[in-house]
């Protein structure tokens, strides 16, 4: 009997629960839960970051390696797990600092199963065994436990420790729903276990004992080093640690944070789509799962609910429609049309809902609102309407008045209208790929019409900036980084865009050591430093970065990416904090109580740094940039396989599935890179003129049937390390290089 079958086998053993040190074999519901007990404080720790100090370390997406540190009553313990194979996991603990005599500090491995099956201990073999259905899980430990006790629940185990201490013997048992293998730090400063799953008790036991005797089973991938070091690793760790099991809906998902939640599960539409985007850097399955969770909030009315939790559902409102942008970028990164097909209908309905339900005066521009449906908290209030921007307490809403007759705010919201235009543009791209040509034309027209309205109606010419505006009046005083969103959706004219750059560089408004504040520095709201009133938000920085790149402002985009990377690393390097938002003056993350320390979209800050090297741009496709800085980064998901990018001594090397595929010393950017079964092509924008060389080491020169730069034929020669070498004059103007060959050497 398998309890949960909706995750790939490679991820079956993982840190699925709210206790990050707990390993769960999800198909059987078997749990190995470390519990700490301190005699000094007479308290236990389940190593749960909502209550206990935990420093979350490295975490592969599939759980093949996990490590963390925790402190309890002055004692610090490091835990790590790694896999021999999908059915066998090995765990270790190590004492890093002692806060009391080791005899009085206990590390306990609590073994249990979700269905309440009896767990047994065989003292002769030193193995714990649990049978679920017809399958067995055996757990062997490097040292025999000092004693084994039996309990009905984890809570009962903790209560036994706290009431009776470690001398208590009355709960000794070799069979119980929760069997506790107890060790102390005087006798076992270090410890290890191995758990194996098999279809017989003897085989599970043999595999667990063999795994325990094996050397370190999992070789860690190299870290992202040199330029923007650690950025890719941070994205992976934030995604992997926040990926948990939603017991209510029997599904895996990447939560906004494993540390704080509302009820048993909580899904914010925008946050969940960003979780999908970040997961897609490494794993198409996890990205697809997260998009499915985000779109599960689709309502019969057409919108996608703002939030859905185990306690409430805000179906009367939504959040800015960024889902199509994420779906399109996931398609670019994975090459899988199925991602578009699975998302399209819900996203298309959502876009149409905005136009029919949030345009009370039929102007073509949107106002935030709250419909008369559902029973969500705050329904029918100004606060509920503000929720639709995701920027609930932003000063840009201070002048907005809730109008009960229209159930909307009195203002046109700039960020929301830019999101609608971009969403329509991305839906048009999606519809074209899916062959839905009438839809493509509809959404392309919506995008163009909305862009024109934004440019004309939401541009404050007196201040030379885009801003929210009263539907029947003037512009509101406060502005936020959404003033740059017309770059993101393509609404800004060239002149308007140039004025926006001046605001970006103005230290009275948006510039500073740490940018971009969500209230300008000269706004009284900036001093509040509470949520959207003055703090820096990763999702906003990411959107502005995309907009700058769209308009070709690569220098400004790179500067913002480096600022954002530095901001993130300030709290990440030593504290492993990935914050929901940051102080715009000091860059501190946890200087006030309205910030979560491990929030999913914090990883958008290092994603920008990664994107400066390798990105999937909504408009320029797969891009790789050789800045000349040394770097080693990967692996990452691409349509052509797992990619690693290295630059050494100015030589850029793109490796696919561990094999060098492309080498070049050319400084500049390769964009719209397309690798197909019998061709490779890209646009080449060199940073400076000179001799250009491209090597394709895995392609035999004898198979090349055509190679061109623009319209000019170029000769394919044998390369110095084998394969093909192409030589040409590199120019600062962009040209497309294409190579066609006769054999199917590259997987599609």
Image (cartoon, rainbow, N blue to C red):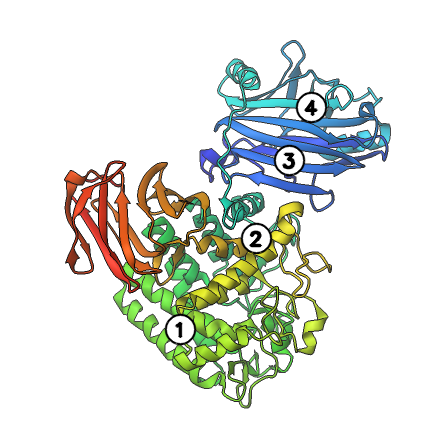
Label 4, label 3: how far apart the Cα atoms are? 16 Å
Give residue 190's mark. 4
Mark 1 burial class by Cα count in 10 Å: few <14, some 14-19, many 20+: many
- The x, y position of residue 738, in whole percent, is 21, 53
Name the image quarter holding residue 352.
Answer: bottom left
Nearer to me, 628 or 493 = 628
Q: Which residue is mark 1?
A: 490
Depth check: give the residue in front, 335 or 654: 654
| Tag 3 residue | 21
Residue depth check, mark 2 versus mark 1: number of the one nearer the observer:
1
Mark 1, secondary structure of its residue: loop
Seen in the picture, residue 409 relative to 150 is either above or below; the reply is: below
Residue 309 shows up from this direction: no
Precedes in sequence: disc 1 or disc 4? 4
- Where does residue 258 sit, x and y in percent of width and height? 62, 47
* Sooner in the amino-acid sequence: mark 2 or mark 3: 3
Position of residue 576 in the picture relative to residue 42 (left or right): left
């Amino acid at each position: 009997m398998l309890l949960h079958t909706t995750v790939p086998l490679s991820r079956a053993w993982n840190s699925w629960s709210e206790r990050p040190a707990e390993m769960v074999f999800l198909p059987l519901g078997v749990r190995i839960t470390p519990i700490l007990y301190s005699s000094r404080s007479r308290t236990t720790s389940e190593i749960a970051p909502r209550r206990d100090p935990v420093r979350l370390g490295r975490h592969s997406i599939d759980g093949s390696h996990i490590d963390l540190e925790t402190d309890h009553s002055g004692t610090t313990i490091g835990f790590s797990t790694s896999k021999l194979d999908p059915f066998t996991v090995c765990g270790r603990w190590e004492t890093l600092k002692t806060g009391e005599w080791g005899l009085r500090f206990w590390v306990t491995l609590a073994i249990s199963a979700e269905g309440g099956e009896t767990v047994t201990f065989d003292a002769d073999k030193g193995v714990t065994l649990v049978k679920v259905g017809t399958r067995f899980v055996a757990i062997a430990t490097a040292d025999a436990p000092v004693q084994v006790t039996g309990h009905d629940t984890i809570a009962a185990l903790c209560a036994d420790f706290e009431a009776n201490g470690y001398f208590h013997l009355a709960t000794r048992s070799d069979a119980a729903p929760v069997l506790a293998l107890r060790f102390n730090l005087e006798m076992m400063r270090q410890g290890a276990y191995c758990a194996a799953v098999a279809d017989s008790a003897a085989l599970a036991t043999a595999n667990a004992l063999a795994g325990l005797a094996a050397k370190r089973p999992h070789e860690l991938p190299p870290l992202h080093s040199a330029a923007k070091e650690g950025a890719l690793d941070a994205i992976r760790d934030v995604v992997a640690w926040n990926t948990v099991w939603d017991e209510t809906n029997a599904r895996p998902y990447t939560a906004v944070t494993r540390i704080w939640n509302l009820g048993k599960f909580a899904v914010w539409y925008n946050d969940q789509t960003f979780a999908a985007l970040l997961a897609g850097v490494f794993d198409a399955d996890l990205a697809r799962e997260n998009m499915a969770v985000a779109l599960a909030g689709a309502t019969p009315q057409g919108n996608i609910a703002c939030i859905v939790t185990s306690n409430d559902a805000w179906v009367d409102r939504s959040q800015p429609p960024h889902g199509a942008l994420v779906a399109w970028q996931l398609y670019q990164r994975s090459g899988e049309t199925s991602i578009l097909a699975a998302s399209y209908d819900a996203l298309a309905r959502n876009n149409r809902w905005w136009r029919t339900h949030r345009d009370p005066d039929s102007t073509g521009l949107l106002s935030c609102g709250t419909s008369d449906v559902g029973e969500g908290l705050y329904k029918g209030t100004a606060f509920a309407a503000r929720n639709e921007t995701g920027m609930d307490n932003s000063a840009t809403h201070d002048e907005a008045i809730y109008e009960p007759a229209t159930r909307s705010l009195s203002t046109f919201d700039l960020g929301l209208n830019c999101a609608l235009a971009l969403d329509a543009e991305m839906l048009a791209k999606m519809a074209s790929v899916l062959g839905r040509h009438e839809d493509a034309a509809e959404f392309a027209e919506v995008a163009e019409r909305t862009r024109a309205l934004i440019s004309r109606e939401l541009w404050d010419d007196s201040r030379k900036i885009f801003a929210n505006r009263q539907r029947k009046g003037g512009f509101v005083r406060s502005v936020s980084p959404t003033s740059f969103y017309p770059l993101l959706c393509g609404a800004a004219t060239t002149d308007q865009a140039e004025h926006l750059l001046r605001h970006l560089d103005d230290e009275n408004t948006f510039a500073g050591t740490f940018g971009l504040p969500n209230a300008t520095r000269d706004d009284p709201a900036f001093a509040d430093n509470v949520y959207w009133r003055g703090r820096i938000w990763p999702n906003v920085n990411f959107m502005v970065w995309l907009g700058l790149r769209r308009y070709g402002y690569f220098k400004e985009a790179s500067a913002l990416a480096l600022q954002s990377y530095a901001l993130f690393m300030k709290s990440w390097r030593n504290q492993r904090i990935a914050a929901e938002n940051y102080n715009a003056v000091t860059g501190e993350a946890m200087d006030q109580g309205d910030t979560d320390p491990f929030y999913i979209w914090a990883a958008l800050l290092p994603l920008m740094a990664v994107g400066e090297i390798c990105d999937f741009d909504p408009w320029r496709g797969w891009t790789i940039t050789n800045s000349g800085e040394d770097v080693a980064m990967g692996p990452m998901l691409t349509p052509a396989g797992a990619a690693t990018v290295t630059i050494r001594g100015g030589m850029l090397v793109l490796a696919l599935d561990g094999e060098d595929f492309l080498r070049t010393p050319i400084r500049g950017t390769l964009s719209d890179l397309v690798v197909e079964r019998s061709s490779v092509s890209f646009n080449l924008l060199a940073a400076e003129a000179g001799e250009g060389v491209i090597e394709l080491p895995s392609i035999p020169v004898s198979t090349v049937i055509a190679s061109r730069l623009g319209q000019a034929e170029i000769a394919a020669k044998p390369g110095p390390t084998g394969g093909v070498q192409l030589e040409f004059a590199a120019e600062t103007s962009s040209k497309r290089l294409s190579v066609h060959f006769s054999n199917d050497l590259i997987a599609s």
